[in-house]
Image (spheres, helix red, strand yellow):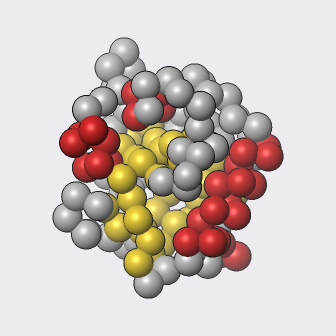
Amino acid sequence: MSPQRLEGQRLFVHEGKLHWASDGAPVDTGEAVTHWSGQGRAMFVMDRHGNLYASLQQEVGHLHHSSFLGGKPVAGAGELEVRNGIPKVVSRKSGHYQPTTEQLYLVRDMLREQGIDVDGVSFEDGF
């Protein structure tokens, strides 16, 4: 993924909500589709610096979790369910990275540090 396209997939936290770096709009995954869960979730990765990248479409054979950072190591990966910028579900469902429970909780902790109220978020540990 080119640096420009990657930046377009980056999310940031503002006033406790997730927004797209590309246009500042609140993230909503209502129309998203993933390989593991289908409708309503986006795939994501978090790099070691806490940068979060997501895509509303997972294209088997073309766009996967490993596409964001070129297969390099990540702090976490999986799926996000977000409504109007408010995260509802974070999972560790990623076939490429197969993140551990510890990585899921690292994502939780990094989101908390960035200003997300994680108390109302469901962190799904299984596949």
The residue lying furthest to the top in this view is: 61
Quarter-wise, where is residue 63 in the image?
top left
- Residue found at x 71% / y 54%: 106
- Residue found at x 38% / y 20%: 60
- Residue found at x 64% / y 71%: 112
Residue 118 horizontal/vertical position (percent): 65, 72
Residue 44 horizontal/vertical position (percent): 48, 44
Quadrant where the C terminus sits is: top right
Quarter-wise, where is residue 96 in the image?
top right
Residue 65 horizontal/vertical position (percent): 47, 32
Residue 70 horizontal/vertical position (percent): 43, 25
Q: Decide: is 75 above or below 111.
A: above
Quarter-wise, where is residue 20 in the image?
bottom left
Q: Nearer the viewer, residue 12 or 41?
A: 12
Q: Decide: is 6 above or below 26.
A: above
Question: Does residue 114 appear in the picture of this structure?
Answer: yes
- Residue found at x 63% / y 44%: 75
